[in-house]
Image (spheres, grey):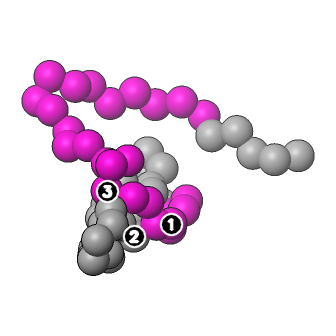
Amino acid sequence: MVKIVDHHPVPGGEDGYSIEVFNAVGDTIAVTSVPESWLEPLLSNEVFSVRRLATAA
């Protein structure tokens, strides 16, 4: 799950957003910034899927 934390307007360019990424139990696993084009709304006909997060060895 991802939550938008902040909006970053860019005059003459693509706006960006700070986002917080959560695991299945609600723990924060990342906070990062992405361009607006990387985000899309959830749709009513979508179902969440759970998989294990791979970690670096």
Q: Nearer the viewer, mark 3 or mark 2?
A: 3
| Residue ranking furthest to the right | 57
The number of discs equals 3
* 11 or 53, nearer to the observer: 11
Most foreground residue, 1 or 42:
42
Residue at the (55%, 59%) spot, across then down: 29
Label 3 Cα neighbours within 10 Å, binned few <14 / some 14-19 / many ≥20: some
Q: CA distance from mark 3 to mark 1?
A: 13 Å
Mark 3 touching mark 2, by CB under 8 A? no
Identify the mark nearer the N-term, 3 or 2.
2
Residue at 26% over, 43% down: 40
Rendered position, 9 above or below 19: below
For the residues bearing labels 3 and 1, Cβ distance under 8 angstroms: no
* Dots 2, 1 in contact, CB < 8 A: yes
Residue 36 on image: x %, y %: 31, 56
Query: Which image quadrant is residue 45 in?
Result: top left
Identified by mark 2, the residue type is Ser
**Distance (Cα) linking label 2 and label 1:** 6 Å
Q: Amino acid at mark 3?
A: Glu
Q: Secondary structure at mark 2?
A: strand
> In the image, what residue occupies the spot 63% across and 40% down?
53
Measured along the vertical axis of the image, is residue 55 above or below residue 32?
A: above
Tell me the tag on residue 18.
2
Residue that badge 3 annotates: 36
Please identify the residue farthest to the front as the structure is shown: 12
Instruction: Judge from the rendering whether residue 24 lies leftward or rightward of residue 11; answer left or right.
Output: right
Query: Can you give x and y, in whole percent of width and height, for residue 42 in the image?
Result: 20, 39
Q: Which residues are magenta?
A: 28-52
